[in-house]
Image: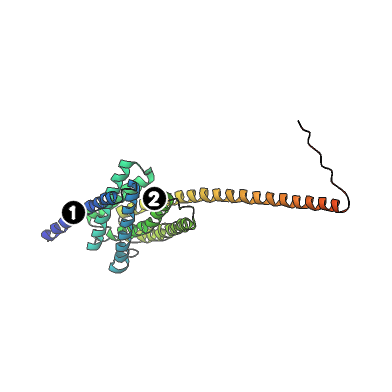
Amino acid sequence: MRLEQSEGVTGSILTFLISCFSWSTLYFLLCIINSKKSYEWNIRIVTVIHALVTSALSMYCAFIDGPWPFTHAGGGNTKLQTFIITLCLGYFLFDLTWCLYFQTEGPVMLLHHSLSIMGLGCCFAWGFYGTEMVATLLGAEATNPLLQWRWFLKQSGKHHTWLGEVVDHAFMISFGVLRLVIGSYFLYCYYQQPTDIFGRFGGTCIYIIGWVFWFNIMQFAYKKYQKKWRAWKMSADKAKMNGHLVKENEQNEIHCNGMIKNGFIPHVKEKKLQ
């Protein structure tokens, strides 16, 4: 029994080391192959790949492999859950190191990464909370590709297009549904299950971070569409003013033509030559 546990721990540590090495290697390969793009461009490609892989594995784990997180959370980790946790732990450690080195992210994102690493580390070390952690990863990473796509469009000068609007709306809607609607229900179900204080504390922290992100998203959306509304209103007022001027000129022209037709010539003051 002890030998099996020892082999399991050794295998998990090896998977974790391979995860760290793999994400780092992928990034450096992208920097070599895609050298014309910035370092941030390449790290965001790695982020998209991680989000897609994690979402696919987490979806399979939650909906097919089990256990179901809304009713059977708080138990021991399965092999697939342990693999997903080690895969993500290696990525978040690499990404946090990158963010600290290049100083591209604010305190909220750094706090999010730190809490994620702490939560994943506890799941990895203790062998528990895998079910709820995988569900949390699914809700968090499913919207990440849209967020990165928005950044790529912005850097390419295509953010203010119909595609940029579609991506923005898709991200806001999916984030609100997954993080707030389903996330709130999941946290409620989690508290109804016989889970311990550590799991509840970690879940509540990530849930609060989600609301902070949502507030930032809504703040950005308000500023963006307020600016668009002002621009549209100024354009409409300008068009209305031009319409009045055209109408006034037409009326003056009709008036002058009518006077000429009746034998009257409108008097036009001549400018004095200086």
Residue 109 located left or right of residue 222: left
User: Where's residue 166, x and y in %?
Assistant: 47, 59
Given this view, does label 2 or label 1 mark the residue nearer the observer? 1
Q: Which image quarter: residue 272?
A: top right
Horizontal relation, residue 221 to residue 88: left or right? right
Decide: few, some or many residues near mark 2? Use Cα within 10 Å; few <14, some 14-19, many ≥20: some
Work out how far the residue at label 2 is from the one at label 1, CA to CA, in angstroms.
29 Å
Residue 136: quarter of image:
bottom left
The local secondary structure at tag 1 comes to: helix
Residue closest to the far front = 273
Give the residue displayed 80% in from the left and 53% down from the top.
254
- In the rendered image, the quadrant that contains the C terminus is top right
Q: Position of residue 9 (x, y in %)?
A: 17, 56
Residue furthest right in the image: 263
Determine contact: label 2, label 1, CB under 8 Å. no
| Label of residue 13 in the image | 1
Q: Earlier in the sequence, mark 2 or mark 1?
A: 1
User: Quarter of the image containing the N terminus?
Assistant: bottom left
**In the image, farthest residue toward the top:** 274
